[in-house]
Amino acid sequence: MAFGTELVAKYGDRVTLHSDDTDPAPNLDAWLDQLGVGAGVYCCGPAIMDAVVCLAAQREELTAHIERFVPLEHNAGQNTQFAVELAQSNTTIEVQAETSMLDALRTVVPDFPASCENGLCGSCELAVVSGRPDHRDDILGPGERDRTDIMYPCVSRARDTKLVVDI
C-alpha cells in the first residue's frame, strides 16, 4: 500500500486496492475475468500473490507480476554434489552438497553478479546449455518450473550429475 495513492492518481480505475484488514476477500476469479488478453496483474501481499499466481497460471492470457521479500519454503529434497561446466572456458567445477552453485561459480568467476542471493531478485540469472536445473527460486512461475534454458544459481541446483552453463 506504500504507493497506493500515487498508483490511483496515475492510473485511476485501472488500480484496485484491497486491504485484508478492512475489506472482505475479493472474488479474484470474477475480477480476473474482466481483464483483457495480454493483461498484467501486479500485486503484493503473500496471500493474494499466491492466489493470483495460481489463477494466472491457469490463464494463458494473463501474466502475474509479483515481488516477494521473503523466500518461500521449498520442499527441495536433499542436496547432492554435481558438476558445472562453464562452456566459454571449458572449465568444470564441482558443487558440493553443502555449497550453493553461486558460491562454487565464484571460485572461478569471482565477480559473478548476484544481489539478494536467496532466489527472489533474478540478478544471477544464468543461461543453461545442457542439463536439467532443479529450480528452487521464487522467480519462475508454476508453468515455468520445467525450463532448461535458464536458472538462478544462488538457490537452484542440478537434477542431473552435470550442467553446462553459458559463462
Image (spheres, rainbow, N blue to C red):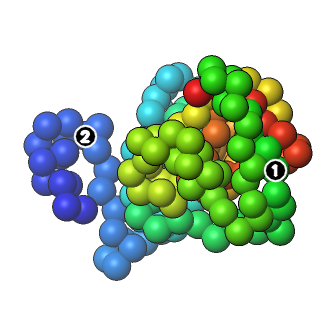
> Percent from the top left, x then y, of residue 140?
61, 43
- Side (left or right) of 116 relative to 8: right
Which label number is shown at residue 118? none
Question: Which residue has dot 1 on it?
Answer: 82
- Side (left or right) of 106 relative to 58: left
Residues 129 and 7: in front is: 129
Amino acid on which disc 1 is placed = Phe
Q: Residue at x 50, y 23 (%)?
A: 38
Question: Which residue has dot 2 on it?
Answer: 13
Q: Of helix, strand and loop, which one carries label 1?
A: strand
Residues 51 and 12: in front is: 51
Residues 164 and 159: in front is: 164
- Side (left or right) of 166 relative to 161: left
- The crowd level at tag 2 (other Cα within 10 Å; few <14, some 14-19, many 20+) is few
Total number of numbered labels?
A: 2
> Percent from the top left, x then y, of residue 100?
63, 58
> Percent from the top left, x then y, of residue 119?
54, 55
Q: Of helix, strand and loop, which one carries label 2?
A: helix
> Percent from the top left, x then y, of residue 8?
18, 46
Q: Is residue 53 above or below residue 150?
A: below
Spatial CA distance of label 2 from label 1 is 51 Å
- The crowd level at tag 1 (other Cα within 10 Å; few <14, some 14-19, many 20+) is some
Q: Residue at x 41, y 56 (%)?
A: 116
Q: Residue at x 24, y 62 (%)?
A: 1
Mark with earlier residue (2, 1): 2
User: Is residue 148 in view from this perspective?
Assistant: no
Which label lies toward us, 2 or 1?
1
User: Is residue 18 in view from this perspective?
Assistant: yes
Amino acid on which disc 2 is placed = Asp
Q: Quadrant of the C terminus?
A: top right
